[in-house]
Image (cartoon, grey):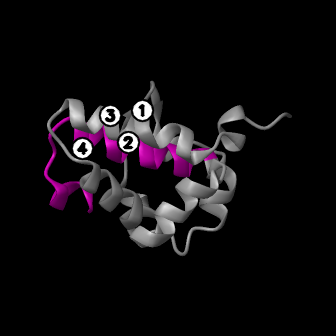
């Protein structure tokens, strides 16, 4: 079975969409970065390096310093799919990030997003 095309998409190509989605709802780029760093263990310098090097999603998550231990608490639906039921581990990580950004855009408090 062929890999999903999002796996080879540069993270830097999708990142501006995360920021735009948040900013449309009066949230900030700093909050988006905080969520990404919380989830993946990257620090701000590491995140900026990923963006400038145009690392793809597969490498972004494979090289993540440490996925947050509370990822199992991320539940809900993104694009009609329950994130906790996604079978492919990489796709599930991508959906976790999508879900957290959705929660930010919906106005949820950072304390609740960062379980």
Q: Position of residue 61 (x, y in %)?
A: 60, 59
Residue topped by disc 1: 78
Left or right relative to 89: residue 71: left
Q: Secondary structure at mark 2?
A: helix
Which label lies toward us, 4 or 2?
Answer: 4
Vertical relation: 99 (above or below) 31:
above
Q: Report if residue 26 is visible in the image.
A: yes
- State the CA–CA distance, disc 4 to disc 2: 9 Å
Q: Position of residue 37 (x, y in %)?
A: 40, 65
Residue topped by disc 2: 99
Q: Report if residue 42 is visible in the image.
A: no
Q: Which residues are magenta?
A: 91-115
Residue topped by disc 3: 20
Residue topped by disc 4: 104
| Mark 1 Cα shell of 10 Å, populated few (<14), some (14-19), many (≥20) | some
Q: Quadrant of residue 21?
A: top left
Q: Position of residue 90 (x, y in %)?
A: 63, 51
In front: 62, or 95? 62
Q: Answer with mark 4 or mark 3, whichever residue precedes in sequence.
A: 3
Q: Answer with mark 1 or mark 4, whichever residue precedes in sequence.
A: 1
Q: Quadrant of residue 77?
A: top left
């Amino acid at each position: 079975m062929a890999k999903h095309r999002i796996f080879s998409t540069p993270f830097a190509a999708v990142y501006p969409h995360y920021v735009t989605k948040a900013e449309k709802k009066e949230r900030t780029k700093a909050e988006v970065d905080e969520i990404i760093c919380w989830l993946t263990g990257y620090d701000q310098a590491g995140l900026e390096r990923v963006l400038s090097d145009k690392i793809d999603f597969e490498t972004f998550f494979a090289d993540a310093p440490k996925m947050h231990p509370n990822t199992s608490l991320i539940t809900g639906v993104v694009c009609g799919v329950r994130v906790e039921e996604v079978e492919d581990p990489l796709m599930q990580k991508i959906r976790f990030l999508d879900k957290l950004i959705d929660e930010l855009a919906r106005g949820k408090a950072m304390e609740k997003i960062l379980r």
